[in-house]
Image (cartoon, rainbow, N blue to C red):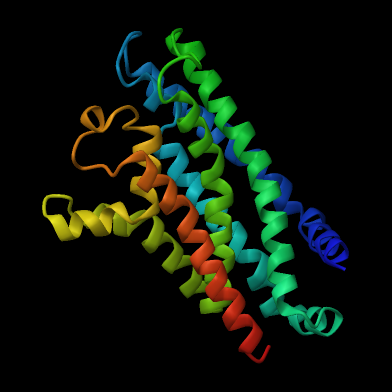
Amino acid sequence: MMRDVIAAEWLKVRSLRSTRWTVAGIVPAVAGAAAADAYTNQPGSRFELGDAFPPAGFLVLIVVATGFGASTMLGEYSSGLIRATSVAVPARAAVIGAKAAVLVALWTVAGTVIAASSFAVAGLVLGDVTLSRPGTGAALLAAILIGPVCALIGLSLAVLVRHPGAVYVSGIVLLVLAPQMVSTRRELPRAINHAMLLPAWQRLTQAYGTPEAAGDIYTTAVQAWLVYALWPLTLLGAAVWVHRRRDV
């Protein structure tokens, strides 16, 4: 049964023309940002790996993936299709699980293409970006996974909040604005900052290396990976709990 539900959810996503345009548009956007960042540095710069994963491009990816994940549920709420889905699949947790599986698969593939393109473009410009550099593997993996992680967060927010405007605003505030508003100068705000997704991504892709090299403002790599895991899992668990108890 779960296979059929996943197939149905995949058909919904694949049938949307916006799916192809979204994925096709985000790849050159991030790669272009990587090229622009790489051109600002001289070859041999210590920030070369960071140039392969530019914040400007990946902030766009974060917003787009979050919005895409949210739209998979908001579209059903606005059209009333969620009622038919609930009748066809009474196990509501299975519906959320199927949507999550489709989003993870789609955005992992898209994230791989995006990260590889961005890395390759920076390498072509700088001429000295290789996979053998310390932290490169973790940075690539973090760049690949930020898409599916944000898509799951968007899906969860859509279930929890339901109202389109509030969902999109809350996603941008939580993932993009809030981390930049919380100071890292004092211990408590720093702990809050370290628990957010954007600083975790920055730690793995921008401030790679040892804690001494990364600096005190960043969390450890292990904590960054925990943030990657806990944000989508916690919100998705809450979304399943709410969806099973809410009248659609």
Closer-to-camera residue (32/246): 246
Quadrant of the image containing the N terminus: bottom right
Task: Using the rendered view, name the quadrant where residue 246 is placed.
Answer: bottom right
Q: Say which residue appears at 42% left-offset and 16% top-offset.
A: 133
Q: Say which residue appears at 53% left-offset and 35% top-offset.
A: 141
Q: Is residue 207 visible?
A: yes
Name the spot of residue 166 as percent of width and height, x first: 46, 74
Q: Is residue 22 visible?
A: no
Closer-to-camera residue (193/168): 193
Residue 46 horizontal side relative to residue 19, left or right: left
Residue 226 horizontal side relative to residue 216, left or right: right
Q: Is residue 152 above or below residue 90?
A: above
Q: Residue furthest bottom?
A: 247
Name the spot of residue 18 as percent of width and height, x first: 70, 53
Q: Say which residue appears at 49% left-offset and 38% top-offset.
A: 142
Quadrant of the image containing the C terminus: bottom right
Q: Is residue 138 above or below residue 174?
A: above
Name the spot of residue 89 as percent of width and height, x first: 82, 78
Q: Is residue 52 above or below residue 9?
A: above
Task: Using the rendered view, name the quadrant where residue 13 is placed.
Answer: bottom right
Q: Residue furthest front?
A: 222
Task: Using the rendered view, name the quadrant where residue 67 is placed.
Answer: bottom right
Closer-to-camera residue (155/200): 200
Total marks placed: 0
